[in-house]
Each structure stands twice: as structure tokens, then as C-alpha cells.
Amino acid sequence: MGSLFHLVLLAAIPPLERSAGDAQQIPSWLMPAFIVYTIFSLTWTSAISLAIYRMSKTDRSTDGLKAELHQANIKLLDERDRRISHQIAHHAQEVANAMIEIGEHAKATHEREMELVKALGDARDFVRVNAADKREFSEFCKEVRDGREKMLQAFASLERQVVTGDDLRKILQEVRRGA
């Protein structure tokens, strides 16, 4: 163990007289401190090694959790994307159905308009064929006036005469024949 503390400790120990064959000796007064230091150093080194081992183990499990979390996140994002694309497809289908309905309604409306145009054309043709012209209308008006005048004359003659029931029947029959 060539730590810095050992070097300082050896530097603090006064040099011993050595002979050529003697090994380096530690003073006896320093031996209990050296033993305590050695035990403390071994314990401390073991504790640090254990802490580093546990941290690396936690790091590895954290890496595994990170990978699982990443996979779960990807799954959630894929599910969300799938749900959104499904909703978009559903809305697009609704829009397409609405467009089809609008087209069908427009086609039906166009067909109804064409039927109305045809009916108006038929009515116009009917009026052209069957309508009276001005001359016929004026003749009809003249007949109505004549009939009106006959009725007024009949009423005037009634006022001048004393009318009995038989006379009244005759007058009414004349009016009916003349109208």
C-alpha cells in the first residue's frame, strides 16, 4: 500500500541505524497506531468498494429501467399516434359521407328543377294552344254584358208589372233561355 499517508508516516519516523543485513523495523510505540490504521484502512477501502459496487449495480438496474421506460414511452407514443390517425380517418370518412350526401342532394335538387322547368314549358305550351286570344276574350265580355242587360231589362219590366206567381215563372224561364 503506497498511499500518501504511509509516505508521510514513514517520513515522520526517525531513521534507525541499520546494518547492511537488517530489515527496516517499525518502532514498537508506533505499532498499535499502525495496526489501527491498517484495520481502519481495510475497513474504509471495503466500505468504499461496497458502495461503488452497489452504485454500479444501481446504475445497471437504472439503465435497465431507463430502457424499459423508453420502451413504455415509445409504446404510449405509438398508441397515441394510432389513436389520432384513427380519429383523423374517422373524421375524413364523415367528411366524405357529408360530401356524398351534398352531391346526392344537389343531384335531387337539379332533377326537381329540371322537372319544374319541363312542367313550366308544358304549361306554356298548353297556354299557347288553349288560351283565348283578344278577340275571343272581347266576344266573351260582350256576351256577359248582353246577358247582364237582358237581366236588367227583365227586372225593369218586373217592376212595371204586377207580377203573379205564373208570370214570375214565365219571366224566369225566359231569362234562363236567354242566358
Image (spheres, rainbow, N blue to C red):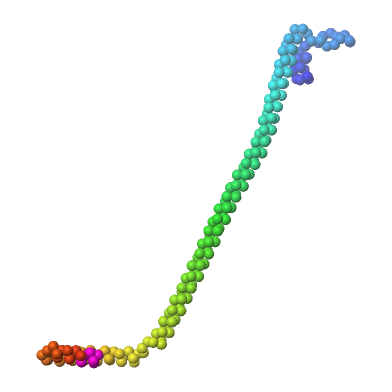
Residue 76: x %, y % from top left: 60, 44
Furthest toward the top, the residue is 28
- Residue 50, relative to residue 175: is it above or below? above
Say which residue appears at 10% left-offset and 90% top-offset. Answer: 162
Magenta stretch? 174-179
Residue closest to the eye, 123 or 16: 123
Instruction: Indicate left or right for 107 with 169 as reference.
Output: right
Q: Inspect this view and state whether residue 149 appears.
A: no
Judging depth in this view, the residue of 3 and 8 nearest the camera is 3
The answer to whether residue 40 is above or below residue 176 is: above
Residue 82, given in percent of the width and then of the height, sits at 60, 50
Say which quarter of the image contains residue 129.
bottom left
Q: Residue 168 at what x, y percent from top left?
A: 15, 89
The residue lying toward the viewer, choosing from 3 and 61, is 61
Could you tell me what secondary structure mostly forms the magenta stretch? helix
Does 84 appear in magenta?
no
Q: Where is residue 137? Give x, y as percent.
A: 32, 89
